[in-house]
Amino acid sequence: MDDRDLIKATVLYYQHDMTHAEIGDSLGWSRIKVTRALKEARSRGLVEFVIHDPVAPFDHLERVLTSTYGLDSCRIGPTTEDPSRTLTSLGIVGAEALRDFLPESGTVTVAMSGALSMVVDQLQGVSLPEVKIAAATGTVAHTTAETTAALAIALARKTGASAYTIPGPLRSTPNVAQALRAEPATAAALELAAGAGHLVLGVGSMFHGGGRMRDSLDAEYVEELAKGGAIGDIATRFFDDDAKHVPSRLDDELLSLEYEQMIAIPKTFVVGAGAGKTKSIAALLRAGIITDLVITEDLARGLLGAAQNREKTG
């Protein structure tokens, strides 16, 4: 068996803790072939508690998606039966990709997502003292652990960069939000975030459980956004299938970058988990908004299928 095939199996088994059955499903192999591959890898000296010269298990799919959507980079983590293991694996793959994405100087704007927080948790060995990490949104009042401000601070600590947060709540009444945006410190923080050269974030979807912002809204807001054609959001701003902003009453209540400001940032690194994000991420990919992508295997196959179906129909 070819060394590259052997290494694909060992990466999934030893690094991502997948079972023989899961590896077989991902690579299109039988369980017997997986068992033989792992045994052969050990006999050839490819594995000695570490994997020598690791090869991306989904390198072909990564190349196809990179070509199909004109990406600068694409990395894929395995999808397992255990969602927590899937996210851990995505964090490992994403941390490797994020190290390559982050600049040596300048501003990087970030927005909170569960998948992205796993990536930051896994990030190691990066020193970027000339970088500013700017929050794209205000914070959420009911939690201190999972906010954009917390993520910006965590990424800054991991990299030796400086963190800049937006002093104010993510969502309030329109009058309060307007007054906060005019406050000098808040205005300066938003200006810094808008002027970044790099954007790092997750993408939400409109189904329940598909995004923090969508899940925080009552039924009336969700219905209003759906009528406007919303299929997802980035950093609390919703967009449609053409990756155009969907305006709503919600916009006046938010302390965050405008949608047009975010999509104007030249390089955008997106982390996504789950096939349910296919529609929203595909829209951003078609519009050329995403430059670097880190996703789970099931989402990758969904995106490839979406591109193929679109080609067949038009």
Image: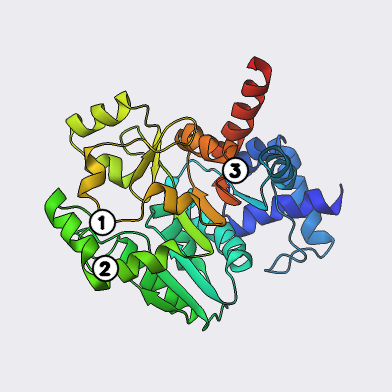
* Residue 212 placement, left or right of 50: left
Circle 1 crowding by C-alpha within 10 Å: few under 14, some 14–19, many from 20: many
Kindly identify the residue that appears in the image at 51 percent across and 58 percent down.
91
View extreme (top): residue: 313
Q: Are marks 1 and 3 in contact (CB under 8 Å)?
A: no
Using the rendered image of the protein, determine whether residue 37 is visible from the camera's viewpoint.
Answer: yes
| Residue 247 occupies quadrant | top left
Instruction: Give the labeled residue for mark 2.
Output: 186
The three-letter code of the residue at mark 3 reads: Gly
For the residues carrying marks 2 and 3, which lies nearer the camera in this image? 2
Q: Marks 1/3: CA distance?
A: 26 Å
Residue 45, x across and y down, in percent:
82, 65
Q: Marks 1/2: CA distance?
A: 9 Å
Kindly identify the residue that appears in the image at 76 percent across and 40 percent down.
33
Kindly identify the residue that appears in the image at 37 percent across and 60 percent down.
136
Using the rendered image of the protein, determine whether residue 202 is visible from the camera's viewpoint.
Answer: no
Residue 79, x across and y down, in percent:
54, 43
The three-letter code of the residue at mark 2 reads: Thr
Residue 46, x across and y down, in percent:
79, 63
Label located before the other in sequence (1 or 3): 1
Which is nearer the eye, 77 or 83? 77
Instruction: Give the labeled residue for mark 3.
Output: 288
Residue 152, x across and y down, in percent:
38, 69
Kindly identify the residue that appears in the image at 21 percent across and 33 percent down.
221
Q: Are marks 1 and 2 in contact (CB under 8 Å)?
A: yes
Q: Provide the secondary structure element on which disc 1 rests.
A: loop
Circle 2 crowding by C-alpha within 10 Å: few under 14, some 14–19, many from 20: some
Label located before the other in sequence (1 or 2): 2
Instruction: Give the labeled residue for mark 1.
Output: 255
Q: Provide the secondary structure element on which disc 3 rests.
A: loop
